[in-house]
């Protein structure tokens, strides 16, 4: 007989950011000689190990009559209880949460945001069993979650298993609530936190367009209801996808100016596309989950980079981005990628696999040794899309790949094997792309973006300053360091491979004082660099380990500040058709 597991969560002290958690277990006598209560070390969708167990204090266990049972902590995140022949018991503890992140636990006098992976231990051996959770909200607060409601006083919910519990964030508070019904499906929009000037009508209209564009791509929506949880905070923390919701932490002033609002739409569209990609179209390892250790896959570049590609592309197709804005965004991605030496040091498969030790935990060598699978994955998906369109005479595209993956995997609730994607692409489109996978996915070749984008009639190149204005701001040299402000001086955070700084012997941690005898304040480092010519020799004065030093550096030419697109003067008919079907616009809509 399986165990019955029921959680009871109530605030213990909001001002101290604490919740009290009770885990009521029944059916113990016939099931177990000992029970292990385990706190997860990661949240699906955020591929980084977290020490969630450090937030737990006062763990204790009692039998059905209230007598204490011995509790032994056997590892950093595992507590063991020997029930001693009883049938019912309670394991309880206090958990601290003051983390305004999309995947964390935040307990304040304004709200409670609960991700189960950061607050609720599971009973080892019961991950696939149904669980119940009861939430006791403070007076005048409401509970919001996508879990199935089975009681209202107090609010009580059921999850089919622990995975669904973790996949269903809970918000307790007084958020601003709006509802839209694109494609006939209710979508709830919650703004959690101090509500300021929210353009509610515009947000509702625009999110409806995102939903409609996603449905148009796949032909359906795999949910009967959905919630956008927006947590208004001081700064960005990004979003976390869930099967029927998303949790996004963003600045409270995100809605102005338009550039910021565009970022709001981009993250919203990205997270909504995860409704298909990652949450349903997924590698085998990403569900059911092992919450005690890393879950490795080589496919995060498609899960996240592919989602980034479609999140932005669907904004274009829905009319929320003009063709120029979309192409400007891609040009910026090109610039960002070309500025990372690690793009030639790590493959996309390696980047995906090493996410646990790199992407979420950058260090001084990250830009030299690794590349983001979000950034490069988006551009590689773009290359694959255009190549499929060109090689099929514009009869097929990556849209067909996504629909195929939905039918074969997402709709069937099964995960993909690690090495099957090239074959799946060929099956979906009839196009062999093993050469691109060899070079760009498992290999480390430079992306030939100008060649691929030419297939859509576009020329891509560094943007030159207008004729006659090349020297308006004076010459500019390049040292090749990333810095942070340290008491008004630039302290080197990383030294880029192949840079003048590396050749001169500068290191992370060095505090720059002067260049060529000129003081080098952190806030005006760029202005000082403009006083020097590429190729010029200059003395770099700096502190290292508290000692003043100097080296000679031959300054270099900075990478292009901007890349840009322009239409070919004489595109072929196929190139024009590819662009028009890709961006769903007329060739004449492109900026000339």
Image (cartoon, grey):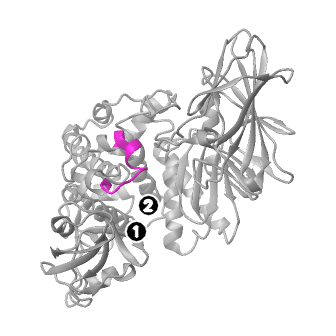
Marks 1/2 in contact by CB < 8 Å: the verdict is yes
Q: In which quarter of the image is residue 479?
A: bottom left
Q: Name the residue under label 1.
A: 325
Position of 142 with respect to 516 (left or right) is: right
Which disc, if any, is residue 316? Answer: 2
Q: In the picture shown, does residue 575 fall above or below 407?
A: below
* Image quadrant containing the N terminus: top right
Residue bounds of the magenta highlight: 352-366
Q: In this view, does 112 lie to the left or right of 489?
A: right
Please give the label number shown on residue 119: none
x, y (%) of residue 46?
49, 44
Observer-nearest of 568 and 42: 42
Residue 50 belongs to the span the image colors magenta: no
- Is the residue 234 above or below the residue 215 in the image? below
Mark before the other along the chain sequence, 1 or 2? 2
Gap between marks 1 and 2 measured at Cα: 8 Å
User: Is residue 554 among what the camera can see?
Assistant: no
Q: Specify few, some or many for label 1: CA neighbours under 10 Å numbering under 14, 14-19, or 20 or more.
A: few
Name the residue nearer the viewer: 582 or 292: 292
* Residue for point 64% across, 39% down: 116
Residue at screen point 55% across, 51% down: 211
Q: Element under label 2?
A: helix
Q: Where is residue 382 in the image (x, y as percent from the top left)?
A: 31, 52
Give coordinates of residue 335: x percent, y percent: 29, 65
| Quadrant in the picture for residue 40 | top right
Question: Is 172 displayed left or right of 208 in the figure?
Answer: right
Q: Is residue 216 above or below residue 571?
A: above
Report the quarter where the C terminus lies: bottom left
How many numbered tags mark residues here? 2
- Would you say residue 361 sits in the magenta stretch? yes
Which residue is pictured at 47% across the width and 39% down the height? 278
């Amino acid at each position: 007989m399986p165990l019955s597991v029921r959680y009871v969560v109530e605030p213990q002290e909001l001002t101290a950011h604490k919740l009290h958690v009770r885990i009521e277990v029944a059916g113990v006598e016939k099931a177990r000689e000992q029970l292990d209560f385990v706190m997860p070390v990661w949240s699906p969708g955020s591929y980084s190990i977290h020490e969630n167990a450090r937030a737990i204090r006062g763990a204790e266990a009692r039998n059905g009559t209230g007598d204490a049972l011995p509790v032994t902590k056997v590892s950093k995140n595992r507590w063991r209880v020997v029930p001693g022949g009883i049938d019912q018991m309670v394991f309880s503890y206090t958990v601290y949460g003051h983390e305004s992140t999309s995947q964390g636990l935040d307990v304040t006098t304004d709200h409670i945001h609960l991700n189960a992976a950061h607050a609720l231990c599971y009973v080892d051996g019961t991950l696939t069993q149904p669980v119940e959770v009861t939430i006791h909200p403070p007076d005048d607060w409401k509970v919001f979650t996508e879990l199935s409601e089975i009681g209202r006083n107090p609010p009580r919910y059921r999850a089919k298993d622990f995975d669904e519990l973790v996949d269903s964030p809970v918000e307790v508070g007084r958020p601003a609530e709006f509802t839209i019904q694109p494609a006939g499906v209710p979508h709830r929009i919650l703004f959690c936190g101090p509500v300021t000037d929210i353009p509610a009508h515009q947000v509702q209209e625009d999110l409806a367009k995102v939903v409609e564009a996603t449905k148009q791509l796949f032909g359906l929506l795999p949910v009967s209801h959905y919630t956008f949880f927006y947590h208004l905070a001081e700064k960005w923390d990004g979003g976390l996808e869930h099967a029927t919701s998303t949790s996004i932490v963003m600045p409270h002033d995100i809605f102005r100016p338009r550039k910021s609002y565009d970022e709001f739409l981009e993250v919203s569209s990205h997270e909504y596309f995860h409704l298909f990609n990652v949450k349903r179209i997924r590698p085998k390892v990403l569900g059911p989950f092992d919450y005690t250790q890393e879950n490795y896959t080589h496919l995060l570049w498609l899960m996240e980079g592919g989602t980034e590609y479609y999140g932005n592309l669907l904004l274009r197709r829905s009319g929320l981005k003009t063709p120029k804005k979309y192409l400007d965004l891609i040009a910026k991605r090109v610039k960002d990628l070309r500025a990372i030496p690690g793009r030639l040091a790590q493959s996309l498969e390696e980047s995906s696999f090493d996410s646990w030790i790199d992407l979420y935990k950058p260090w001084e060598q990250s830009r030299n040794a690794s590349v983001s699978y979000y950034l490069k994955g988006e551009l590689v998906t773009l290359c694959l899309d255009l190549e499929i369109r060109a090689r099929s005479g514009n009869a097929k595209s990556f849209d067909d790949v996504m629909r195929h993956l939905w039918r074969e995997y997402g709709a069937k609730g099964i995960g993909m094997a690690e090495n099957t994607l090239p074959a799946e692409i060929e099956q979906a489109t009839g196009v062999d792309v093993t050469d691109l996978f060899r070079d760009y996915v498992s290999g480390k070749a430079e992306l030939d973006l100008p060649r691929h984008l030419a297939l859509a009639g576009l020329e891509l190149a560094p943007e030159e300053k207008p004729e006659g204005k090349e020297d308006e701001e004076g010459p500019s040299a390049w040292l090749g360091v990333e810095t942070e402000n340290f008491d008004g001086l630039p302290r080197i955070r990383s030294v880029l491979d192949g840079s003048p700084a590396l050749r001169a012997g500068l290191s992370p941690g060095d505090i720059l004082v002067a260049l060529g005898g000129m003081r080098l304040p952190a806030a005006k480092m760029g202005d000082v660099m403009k006083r020097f010519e590429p190729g010029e020799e200059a003395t770099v004065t700096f502190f290292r380990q508290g000692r003043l030093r100097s080296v000679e550096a031959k300054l270099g030419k900075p990478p292009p500040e901007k890349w840009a697109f322009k239409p070919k003067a004489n595109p072929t008919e196929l190139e024009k058709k590819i662009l028009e079907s890709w961006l769903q616009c007329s060739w004449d809509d492109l900026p000339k």
